[in-house]
Amino acid sequence: MLETNRLLYVGFMCHQTIEKILKAYYVSQIEDKPPFTHNLSMLANQSELYSKEEHKDLLDTLGPLNIETRYPTDKDKIMESLIKSVKI
């Protein structure tokens, strides 16, 4: 998908992967069900993984891609921001 410039879907898949990892880590550390959310920053914070600035930047970049991919109200705007920030 990256090679064919389908950046919104690449971002969505990255979001999904990180969300599942954070939820698995939450379960392993807190030994409880993870919150019902797609908010990566909240999941990382509750799992005590939200400390490094570069991690915060990545999570903040990926955060809106989950909702915007499923409900693309501003799809063109997001695509433009991805194209400007991607270094291939």
Image (cartoon, grey):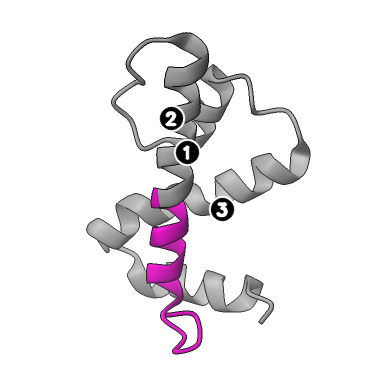
Q: Is residue 37 left or right of residue 53?
A: left
Q: Quadrant of the N terminus?
A: bottom left
**Three-letter code, disc 2:** Ala
Extreme residue in the front direction: 28
- To which residue does mark 2 refer? 24
Looking at marks 2 and 3 on the same chain, the residue that comes earlier in the sequence is marked by 2
- To which residue does mark 1 refer? 21
Query: What x and y, as percent, mark residue 18?
Result: 48, 45
Query: In the depicted view, which residue is nearer to us: 29 or 1?
Result: 29
Extreme residue in the bottom direction: 4
**In this picture, is 76 found above or below 3?**
above
Residue 37 sits inside the magenta stretch: no
Check whether the beta carbons of the residues at disc 1 and disc 2 lie within 8 A of each other: yes
Magenta part mainly helix, strand or loop? helix
**Three-letter code, disc 3:** Thr
Highlighted range, magenta: 1-16
Looking at marks 1 and 3 on the same chain, the residue that comes earlier in the sequence is marked by 1
Q: Quadrant of residue 45?
A: top right
**Three-letter code, disc 1:** Ile
